[in-house]
Image (cartoon, rainbow, N blue to C red):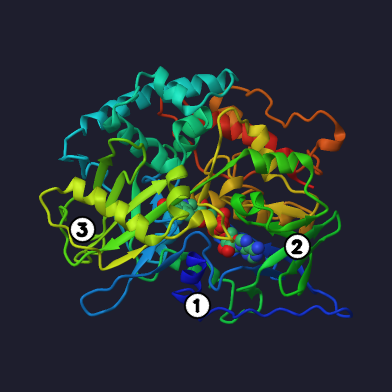
């Protein structure tokens, strides 16, 4: 498979950490033993291990499919500079999203990006030119129209949430607020830029309440800035920095290029089996595999996951976001503009957003531009060959720049996230009509098997920082189980604020958000632990906003979270 090939043959060797080391299992041998098996070495897995390490729990193993850590924060080489040296581009996560403001909470990924000197540039969304099939056409006023509508529909989403009313789809939310693109393809392109580009799903396919909540939790709580990473070590440089604080060079606790095929769990432990027949026996395990991996039945769970867990895995969506990179022998687009928006005359989401890397602050002089598609267009192009896709892109570029004699690209490449066997998609999204209760079932542990990753974050799903918070939470929870107490008293046992703090600040008691199960047999295997009610400070949410969607979310999480400890 193309993408697997890229990752195994490019920059994916991390020489300072270990080559795979695992014990083979034969009929008479036993599995390698550990206290905690961490399945996956992406952001959530590496952060979970750090949380354990911070609690002086060093007996863990991280089991990772790829030859390097980082997971969906993945890069490769592309094209070359004037000296023949390849550029490094990000195939997956590219932005630190929602940085934080002075005195307010800071996105932890931003904290680490600064600590490990990750090169990045502010994304200026005002730096945009708009096009259709006839060339440049200024419809930037539609961006302003959509922004005006946003302030209406976010209020409406808030009303639905606080009044415990039925979720809608985002289409209804946008339409009722007055933005109706219908057959206006420029308006559709603008709507795609504002919605689909972030969520990787259309408004019809997205939850209204939780789509808005997700946005607010990141961009109002931290800040609305997004910084684009262009570090030639790769975005995962910060994660390697974090890992190096607790993993020695060639640490035998990191098993790279090791593929998990079976996970057998019970109330006394978890046995993990690899594709070569080797195995690991752990007291606890944290599964950080993506929602796409869980949905595609590539790992066998024994016993089968309970219905409530299977239902939640099937309910939430795994989106696909595809960047298509092209290098030319010249920069024929405006080198001072960051974004170029194209409205196809026939197809919504047809190569709508183009980003220049040749611009100052990015990879100036690289002559690299890339387009992004998501959702169904991603599925379509990821299933077709490079030449077909390249021809489609060239046709669009020639429409956008009718006065330029555009040469053929000298380099061309795109990943196939929807087909990548260790990810099966890019990041999760919430469908219309879902609930916090349903999401808690996605997040809850089954016996001694815990789950963490961007998809288990109700507040920050889809983001790197969602994976980070969830990895830390799972690591701290298991540290607490091993120590039989809350081991992190100063900061608490989880990252959400205590319910008393929320009540004290907001002055309202939210309606109970505990999962509603009909019988004892379809409940999560775990039960509330009323005495373990501590949650760490995550910093105050922004109370200056007219509607505090996030307050209710925090309170609801805090209450529903009580069901998921052993
Ligand atoms: C194209 C794209 C663009 C994105 N853009 C952004 C962005 O700009 N900003 C942002 O904040 N977020 C972005 N994201 C989302 C972000 O990358 C994810 O939220 C985050 O990386 C998820 O981390 P994780 O640890 O939850 O999962 P993963 O990174 O998927 O980690 C899970 C690990 O498990 C491993 N694994 C899977 N199956 C097996 C198996 N059978 N055996 C062993 N190991 C296995 C995988 O190899 C992987 O390393 C983007 C993602 C993509 C794909």
Label 1, residues with CA under 10 Å away: few <14, some 14-19, many ≥20: some
User: Label 1's element?
Assistant: loop
The image position of residue 180, as x and y in percent, is 35, 22
Label 3: which secondary element:
loop
Which residue position is annotated with label 2? 262
Residue 359 circle label? 3
Q: Marks 1 and 3, how far apart in space? A: 29 Å
Residue 433 occupies quadrant = top right
Which residue corresponds to mark 1?
Answer: 13
Observer able to see residue 534? no
Disc 3 vs disc 2: which is toward the camera?
2
Q: Please state the horizontal and vertical placement of residue 18, each as a whole percent of the image.
A: 59, 79
Residue 566 location, x and y as percent?
80, 47
Residue at the spot 41% in from the left edge and 17% down from the top edge: 176
- Is 393 placed left or right of 32 in the picture? left
Q: Is mark 2 within 8 Å of ligand 1?
A: no
Question: Nearest the camera: 372 or 35?
Answer: 372
Q: How many C-alpha atoms fall within 10 Å of the one at disc 2: few (<14), some, or many (≥20)? A: some
Give the vertical position of 318 relative to 481 (above or below). Answer: above
Q: Is residue 396 visible?
A: yes
Sequence-earlier tag: 3 or 2: 2
Outermost right residue: 28
Question: How many numbered discs, if any?
Answer: 3
Instruction: Out of 296 and 525, give the one closest to the viewer.
Output: 296
Image spot of residue 494 (x, y percent) = 64, 47
- Does label 1 or label 3 sit earlier along the sequence? 1
């Amino acid at each position: 498979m193309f993408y697997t090939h890229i990752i195994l043959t490019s920059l994916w060797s991390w020489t300072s950490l270990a080559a795979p080391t695992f014990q083979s299992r034969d009929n008479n041998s036993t599995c390698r033993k550990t206290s905690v098996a961490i399945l996956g070495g992406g952001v959530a897995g590496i952060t979970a291990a750090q949380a354990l390490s911070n609690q002086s729990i060093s007996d863990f193993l991280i089991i990772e499919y790829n030859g390097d850590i980082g997971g969906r924060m993945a890069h490769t080489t592309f094209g070359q500079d004037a000296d023949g040296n390849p550029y490094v581009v990000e195939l997956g996560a590219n932005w630190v999203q929602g940085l934080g403001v002075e005195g307010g909470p800071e996105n932890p990924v931003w904290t680490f990006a600064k600590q490990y000197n990750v090169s990045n540039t502010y994304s200026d969304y005002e730096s945009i030119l708009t096009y259709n099939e006839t060339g440049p056409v200024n419809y930037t006023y539609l961006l302003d129209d959509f922004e005006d509508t946003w302030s209406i529909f976010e209020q409406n989403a808030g009303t639905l949430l606080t009044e415990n009313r039925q979720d809608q789809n985002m289409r209804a939310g946008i339409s009722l607020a007055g933005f109706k693109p219908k057959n206006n393809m420029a308006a559709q392109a603008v709507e795609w830029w504002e919605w689909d580009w972030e969520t990787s799903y259309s408004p019809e396919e997205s939850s209204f309440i939780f789509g808005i909540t997700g946005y607010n939790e990141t961009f109002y709580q931290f800040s609305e800035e997004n910084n684009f990473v262009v570090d030639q070590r790769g975005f995962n440089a910060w994660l390697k920095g974090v890992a190096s604080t607790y993993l020695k060079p060639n640490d035998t606790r990191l098993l790279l290029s090791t593929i998990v095929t079976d996970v057998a769990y019970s109330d006394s432990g978890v046995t993990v089996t690899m594709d070569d027949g080797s195995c690991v026996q752990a007291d606890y395990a944290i599964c950080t595999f993506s929602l796409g991996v869980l949905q595609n039945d590539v790992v066998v769970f024994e016993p089968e996951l309970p219905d409530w867990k299977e239902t939640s895995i099937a309910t939430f969506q795994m989106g696909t976001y595809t960047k298509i990179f092209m290098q030319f022998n010249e920069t024929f687009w405006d080198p001072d503009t960051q974004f170029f928006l194209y409205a196809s005359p026939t197809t919504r989401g047809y190569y709508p957003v183009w980003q220049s890397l040749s611009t100052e602050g990015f990879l100036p002089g690289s002559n690299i531009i890339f387009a992004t598609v998501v959702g169904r267009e991603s599925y379509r192009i990821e299933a077709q060959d490079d030449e077909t896709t390249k021809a489609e892109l060239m046709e669009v570029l020639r429409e956008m720049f009718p006065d330029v004699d555009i040469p053929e690209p000298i380099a061309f490449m795109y990943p196939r996230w929807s087909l990548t066997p260790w990810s099966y998609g890019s990041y999760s999204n919430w469908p219309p009509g879902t609930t916090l209760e349903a999401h808690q079932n996605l997040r809850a542990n089954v016996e001694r098997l815990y789950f963490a990753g961007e998809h288990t974050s109700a507040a920050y799903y889809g983001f790197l920082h969602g994976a980070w918070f969830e990895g830390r939470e799972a690591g701290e929870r298991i540290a607490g189980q091993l120590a039989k107490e809350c081991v992190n008293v100063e900061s608490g046992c989880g990252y959400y604020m205590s319910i008393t703090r929320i009540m004290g600040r907001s002055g309202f008691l939210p309606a109970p958000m505990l999962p509603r199960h009909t019988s004892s047999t379809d409940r999560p295997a775990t039960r509330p632990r009323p005495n373990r009610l501590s949650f760490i400070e995550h910093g105050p949410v922004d109370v200056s906003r007219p509607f505090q969607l996030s307050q209710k979310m925090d309170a609801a999480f805090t209450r529903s979270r009580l069901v998921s400890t052993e």
